[in-house]
Amino acid sequence: MLSPFLQKLLFVNQFNIDKGKISLLGDKLIMLHASAILELQDIDETKLYEIAKKSSLNNLVNFVEHAKVYGKIKNVIIKELIELGQKIGQTDEGTIKTLENLFNINGLGKMNINNLDNEKKEALITIIDSTIALEWLEKNKKESKNAACTLTAGVLAGMFSYIFGEDVDCVEISCKAKGDNICEFKIGGQHSERFK
């Protein structure tokens, strides 16, 4: 079953899977198996984090710009994306819901924004059933000594860098792959020395 968010996008031809191609709000996407992401992460965790952060930031900017270009389309989701660009810096519940919906279509797990402090440029995020963590456990048949969701942390860092209007980083403070109940991420500017 498709999420209501994707159903809205399908309705206005802003999500499409056809002829071997996937597009979302005008951007091309590629589906990869979670094990492929784990293999990439093993090559260079720091580089993957930085790439995911930059890509996530650019994608969110493009989503908002795309929504502005097609703003005359009368559809709730397009209006939500336009409003997202206008609500940066506010703690509006609609903005939080839109961010959660945008993240959730990535297939990385179900995101909940537990705390959002725009003044301090900080957020506390949980990911329920993290695809990366679950794949790590399935692949390795044991718990990890370290947090496993580097790609997710990078995506969140890019997303919140856009929302906060400044560069922030993300640290996974609990991880299902380590035996924790959920994956939890702390976002803020003070984490710039993330991997040092």
Image (cartoon, rainbow, N blue to C red):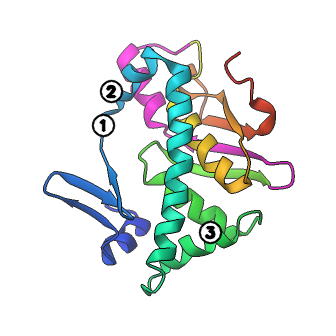
Q: Is 122 in the magenta?
A: yes
Q: Residues within 10 Å of mark 2 (few under 14, many from 20)?
A: few
Relative image position of residue 128 (x, y in whole percent):
54, 43
Between residue 135 and residue 149, name the one nearer to us: 149
Specify the segment rendered in magenta.
Answer: 118-144
Circle on res. 84: 3
Nearest to N terminus: mark 3 or mark 2: 2
Q: Quarter holding the N terminus?
A: bottom left
Relative image position of residue 18 (x, y in whole percent):
17, 60
Q: Quarter holding the C terminus?
A: top right
Q: Is 160 in the magenta?
A: no
Q: Is residue 161 left or right of residue 144?
A: right
- Residue at image position (73%, 53%) is 164
Q: Amino acid at mark 1?
A: Leu
Q: State the image quarter where residue 53 is shown.
A: top right
Q: Residues within 10 Å of mark 1 (few under 14, many from 20)?
A: few
CA gap, disc 2 and disc 1: 6 Å
**Circles 2 and 1: CB atoms closer than 8 Å:** yes
Q: Amino acid at mark 2?
A: Ala
The residue beneath circle 1 is 32
CA gap, disc 3 and disc 2: 32 Å
Q: Nearer the viewer, mark 1 or mark 3?
A: 3
CA gap, disc 1 and disc 3: 28 Å
- Residue at image position (59%, 16%) is 146
Nearest to N terminus: mark 1 or mark 3: 1
Q: Amino acid at mark 3?
A: Leu
The residue beneath circle 2 is 36
